[in-house]
Image: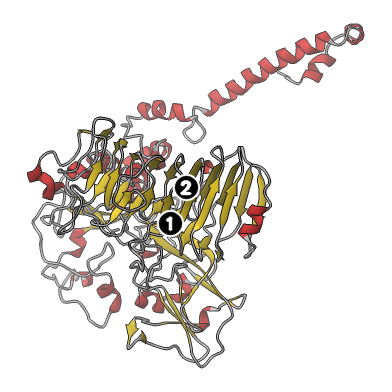
Amino acid sequence: MNTNTDRLYSLLPAVYRLRDAERGEPLRALLAVLADQVDALQENLAQLYDDQFIETSADWVVPYIGDLIGYRALHGVVPQISSPRAEVANTIAYRRRKGTASMLEQLARDVTGWDARVVEFFQLLATTQYMNHIRPRAIVTPDLRKWEPLERLGSAFETTAHTLDVRNPSTALGTSKRGKYNIPNIGIFLFRLRAYALTNSPAFQLDAHRYLFSPLGNNAALLNRPETEKEITHLATPRNVPLPISRRVLNVSLADFYGRDKSFVLRVNDADVDASQIVVCDLSDANGGWAHEPPSEKIAVDPVLGRIAFNTGDVAPSSVVVSYHYGFSADMGGGEYNRIASFDETLPIAQTVRDGDSIQNALDALTESGAVEIGDSARYAETLALNVSANTNLELRAANHPRPQLALGGDLLVKGDASAQVTLNGLLISGGAIHVSGDFGTLRLRHCTLVPGQTLDTNGNPFSPDKPSLIVDAPNATIELEHCIVGALRVVASARVVITNSIVDATEETRVAFAAMDGERAGAPITLKNSTIIGKIHSREIEFASNSIFLARLAENDSWDAPVISTRKQAGCVRFSYVPFFSQTPRRYRCQPTKPSDEARVRPQFNSLRYSDASYCQLSQRTAFEIRAGADDDAEMGAFHDLYHPQRESNLRTRLDEYLRFGLEAGIFYST
């Protein structure tokens, strides 16, 4: 059926078309309405045909197709697998390959969204050799001349033989009583950390010949860029998962990791450095400097510490730019991930900044509402001041994917009218705090990092741990933080603060994370959701707190009465959160601990609380189940709530019950 209005109109006799033209073409208008309806019907029929195939069907059809083949639905809250299209499409293939290691590996990746490696532990059992069937891989004594088996020892990729372990591998996570090496045991190793890219970022210069990959000037391990396969045809290798690059591995396989579109590359004096000029060294601290100096006309790289060294006898480079991958748990604090949904679509891009242009000049050029967009991951060393006029909405943001650094020489000053709005998006801010003053309106921070402690040393420790990241003395201001990492906050009591999916880090549990300007009196009313707070809190009112962690404690001879204090306890609510038991808070609902004797047991444990580490603020598997699955939707409390770790693990265990061969026992192990 032809739905084109002109074609339909041409089928009419000429006499009707002539008369229709004389009367202003009402008949053509009627045919246009009919054609629209026919187009809609034809499109619907085409979609009905597409809905018969899992590859082209609408999302709502996927469960129905799955039901036809006996597919059991999983938790749909995990963003990466909210539509189980891939798993439904692969169900038949899964069943044909049931119990094989490669199938289990692909299954684990599909239902968790994490990279995975499956290990058949019977392959690593040390056994008595039968001379007619020698197993070279099962030799008990490792060969110390072979570096790689020793390098991989204890990891998901080890090949060294072990004696029999009769413990069950499926024992609850976080315990030390989990077995591995036995005939029926299967290990599923999951890699929770992701490798995030940072492209064309200026290396941090220590002196004329020493640099660091991290733009903040701290040690940072380099991760390999995982080579992801659409369909698993072999078990994962170290190249297929995000792992820290060791010195030995890089030295042996430099060409596999170095270069554009690989794990890292150096650009010196505006030209890419060839791999033949790179030498791998241990650049640890020694005798007041770094341990080794590279040969003449060579550049030394230490992937473990993220350090770069040039020979002191060579001419010092004028510029060093790096592209590399670092590890982190989630899309938070800015980075080369998709942030387009966080942009204010109502604001036009009024100014674009890149290649070291002045951000302040671009901001000063704005005379009305608009966005200033930074288009690269360069370092911008300037001290900004934003004075926003009435009814003006200004957004200073990184373009989608770049992560520029604002290296402030002093505090970033924000002031303006009560109706003014300022949004900072996707920025890494170091060297100073954001200071909001005057009769200012609303400040929003989205996907930003205000480095806790302001400045880090080479070991990732803060130089100024007591200096706050955000200072607000504007009496009527509203502060909103979304997917941010910030240091301590000092907010006047008459303002208001809303924090969502973020980390507030005072660098120590006994330091003050939130209070008024003097760090003692009650700060502004605060609302928290899915966030982690490290340090003490004194708020005029905790209006609402949900699925959050308050990691705070009193120091010896502390002047505070409690680690978390809300002056108004009759208003507000704290729900599904960890709060130290003797805190002074509003009514608590389903919070932990429930009694003083449980405080030590349920206290959250983290893999790291140092900002520069890849596992920063990631809950340890030793943490009590009440915290790891204590949110209102059975996810974990804290800043990484939206990763839904418990649901992913539950999805995998559900599938293992279906696809694991009878008699086998599977254990889930988190490698990162």
Q: Is residue 439 above or below residue 21?
A: below
Quadrant that contains the C terminus: bottom left
Say left or right for 233 vs 152: right
Amino acid on which the number 2 mark rests in the picture:
Leu
Mark 1–mark 2 contact, CB under 8 Å? yes
Tell me: 452 left or right of 259: left
Q: Count neighbours of disc 1 (C-alpha within 10 A) and say few if under 14, some if 14 to 19, many if 20 or more.
A: many
The residue under label 1 is 450
Q: Residue at x 76, y 10 (%)?
A: 30
Residue 115 in view of the camera: no
Side (left or right) of 92 relative to 201: left
Foreground residue, 180 or 541?
541
Q: Give the Cα separation between the discs numbered 1 and 2.
A: 10 Å
Residue 3 location (% of width, % of height): 72, 19
Horizontal and vertical percent position of residue 331: 42, 50
In the rendering, which numbered label is found on residue 445?
A: 2
Q: Nearer the viewer, residue 33 or 452?
A: 452
Q: Nearer the viewer, residue 325 or 59?
A: 325
Percent coordinates x, y for residue 63 in the rendering? 39, 28
Is residue 68 among the parts visible in the rendering? yes
Q: Quadrant of residue 590?
A: top left
Badge count: 2
**Helix, strand or loop status at disc 1:** strand
**Residue at the location (42% across, 88% down)?**
293
Name above or below for residue 58 compared with residue 226: above
